Amino acid sequence: MTFPSIAVRELPLFPLPGMILFPGRPLPLHIFEYRYRMMMNSILESDRRFGVLLWDQEKNAPSNIGCCAEIVRFYRLPDDRMEVLTLGQQRFRVLEQVREKPYRVGLVQWIQDEPTIKDLRPMTRDVGQLLQDVVRLSGKLTGESIDLPDDLPDTPIELSYWIASNLRGVPEEQQALLEMINTEERLERESEILTSTRNHLAARTVLKDTLGDNFPVE
């Protein structure tokens, strides 16, 4: 997907509590509020793009950095609600809010990771191995068969986005990863998270093997 060679544009904004969209990652949405049904109808008549922002419930305001979503499929329900499948595109920074009603529209600037001459492939392989370890230990601990997808990205930036999008229950951490503009720093932080998770799961696995049927579920 290519973007027009412009630095700034207006973009409809869709704040979401607890959810962060990353480039290249899918995000299904159920659209029911009247203002957002209006927004989707308008978007479908243009380039099918809008901005997804994390809603900060403590500040009662959206984050300043988000990810552009493109509608790839939609289904209109009888009462005009919509089921929408979107795909993350380019990240952006909100420069200013153009208007708030009937829905938010912002003046945004595209952002991307800084170019690097460092070979990040070794780090990418290491992070990928950590991910494999976490999945293997999770499966052993739960007794379930858990597999990584066959199309798991293997390039540094795409893998970093995939891992970030699959972190669960830590929206603040995800937002911090989204805002990073250095691929190496994002992978380093994800390596720390995965290492901590692996060590925790390994300890619980040993405990499970020791206690057997007496092992607490959680």
Image (cartoon, rainbow, N blue to C red):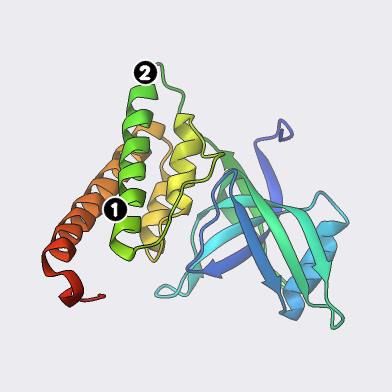
In the rendered image, the vertical position of residue 191 relative to residue 167, given as above or below: above
Residue sitting at 49 percent across and 29 percent down?
155
Compared across the picture, whether 110 is left or right of 43 comes to left
- Residue labelled with disc 1: 137
Q: Secondary structure at mark 2?
A: loop
Q: Residue furthest front?
A: 213
Q: Secondary structure at mark 1?
A: helix
Tell me residue 44's x, y (percent): 84, 58
Q: Quadrant of the N terminus?
A: top right
Q: Residue 30: in sight, yes or no?
A: yes
Residue sitting at 58 percent across and 50 percent down?
67
Q: Residue furthest bottom?
A: 79
Tell me residue 168's x, y (percent): 41, 62
| Nearer to me, 8 or 2 | 2
Which three-letter amino acid code belongs to the residue tagged 1? Leu
| Nearer to me, 68 or 204 | 204
Residue 118 circle label: 2
Tell me residue 141's x, y (percent): 28, 61
